Image (tube, helix red, strand yellow):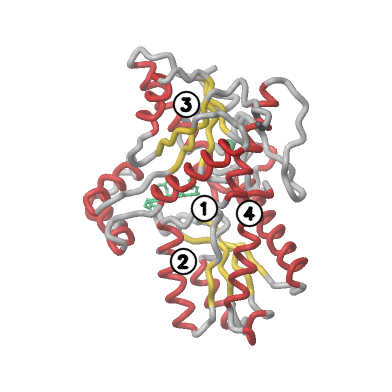
Amino acid sequence: MRDALDATPYDALLLLSFGGPEGPDDVVPFLENVTRGRGIPKERLKEVGQHYFLFGGVSPINDQNRALLDALRKDFAEHGLDLPIYWGNRNWAPYLTDTLREMVADGHRRVLVLATSAYASYSGCRQYRENLAESLAALQAEGLEPPRIDKLRHYFNHPGFLEPMIDGVIASLAELPEDVRDGAHIAFSTHSIPNASADTSGPVEGHGEGGAYVAQHLEVSRLIADAVRERTGVDHPWQLVYQSRSGAPHIPWLEPDICDHLEERHASGVPAVVIAPIGFVSDHMEVLYDLDTEAKAKAEELGLPMRRSATVGDDPRFAAAVRDLVLERAAVERGQEVTPCALGALGAGHNVCPVGCCPARAPKPAAAGVDSPYA
Ligand SMILES: CC1=C(CCC(=O)O)c2cc3nc(cc4[nH]c(cc5[nH]c(cc1n2)c(C)c5CCC(=O)O)c(CCC(=O)O)c4C)C(CCC(=O)O)=C3C
Ligand SMILES: [Fe+2]
């Protein structure tokens, strides 16, 4: 029998994700959740929802999280980590507050959170911490004792997050026609966000052009491109590019957009492109629509051979990385010396978001940080 792995003081893991609609009737209510407080008229939401209606109103994200849950539970059981795993979303069922209420009823007092976003940004980090604080306040208002919540560090440079994407890029290169393969360009793609949000992403000392958000994505791009060169012997040119921008057109968001980038690369004579969606944990709507539909159509219009590489999804190496991150954080909480697992030059990020990390436009309480109103 394997030695039992020790996650003390934690008694449960919570997978926290964005959530997505699971049928046509869900789309507008889901979008109302996502854009709450931004006063977007229902007609505009129906327009934004067109991407979802193209896929029958179903986002793949919830099923991808169900598959990730299965992979995590399988890995934990096979390695003797007896830690129950729950799942809650920001914008659709199972909602975070309902899941936390269930965790309290099951007697859990110390909860560790895995967000399905590997990087520092307001949308991918602090907004999840604000969701946690809102839910804890709701439980308190019901007379329940909220559990103590910590959040796992940004895992963009964990080998278990990188290895599946390195294999994915190599597999996509191999799918390209042989005569254009070695000259192929790699476009590392992530979610565009407002420049102002990027510049203030991560801890204050890293604020400045692009902030931690751009620095972390450049590091991931470099680590993948270097590994592809070492394993294939071919040095592919690459660039970090952005997708899925929204909001008012006059507000500057990170560029270049992936479709503009394909045009520009084609005009400069690049023979083929692999698009690597490093900004996302799974192939959800912003991959299926923005890349596999829009960017694919642009590449076909240009006559540019293009393949899109896989996200990590429920890869066993990512599940093993989560186990490693949980045990690492638990050991830190027990006061033990740990050597965090992280590749590249940036090193392992903070365990507790410092004051001023990924600040919101309008400050709101946020859990799992130095400035958390909860213990
Ligand atoms: C950084 C980032 C991530 C990655 C981190 C993470 O994974 O959390 C992410 C993920 C996602 N974004 C998603 C969908 C949407 N994002 C929107 C709007 C926005 N996202 C933003 C940023 C991000 N978003 C921003 C700055 C906005 C505009 C302002 C705002 O509203 O804060 C809108 C509203 C319509 C619109 O404005 O386009 C929708 C529908 C889905 C679900 C996909 C599915 O259903 O499969 C997922 C996983
Ligand atoms: Fe943060």
User: Which mark sits nearer the N-terminus, 3 or 2?
Assistant: 2
> Does dot 4 land on a helix, a strand or a loop?
helix
Q: Quadrant of residue 182?
A: bottom right
Q: Nearer the viewer, residue 28 or 223?
A: 223
Look at label 3 and name its amino acid.
Answer: Pro
Going by the numbered disc 2, the residue's amino acid type is Leu
Q: What's the distance in space between the residues labelled 1 and 3, CA to CA?
A: 31 Å
Question: What residue is pinned by disc 4?
Answer: 217
Displayed quadrant of residue 131: top left
Query: Label 2 to label 1, Cα distance in Å?
Result: 16 Å
The residue sitting at 62% across, 81% down in the picture is: 270
Mark 3 Cα-neighbour bin, 10 Å: few <14, some 14–19, many ≥20: some
Which kind of residue does numbered mark 4 sit on?
A: His
* Precedes in sequence: disc 4 or disc 1: 4
Please determine whether, in this image, residue 360 is positioned above or below residue 242. above
The label nearer to you, 4 versus 1, is 1
Which residue position is annotated with label 1? Answer: 313
Which residue position holds label 2? 291
How far apart are the two marked residues, 3 and 2, measured between alpha carbons?
Answer: 35 Å
Report the front residue among 24 and 122.
24
Secondary element at image label 2:
helix
Question: Mark 2 or 1 closer to N-term?
Answer: 2
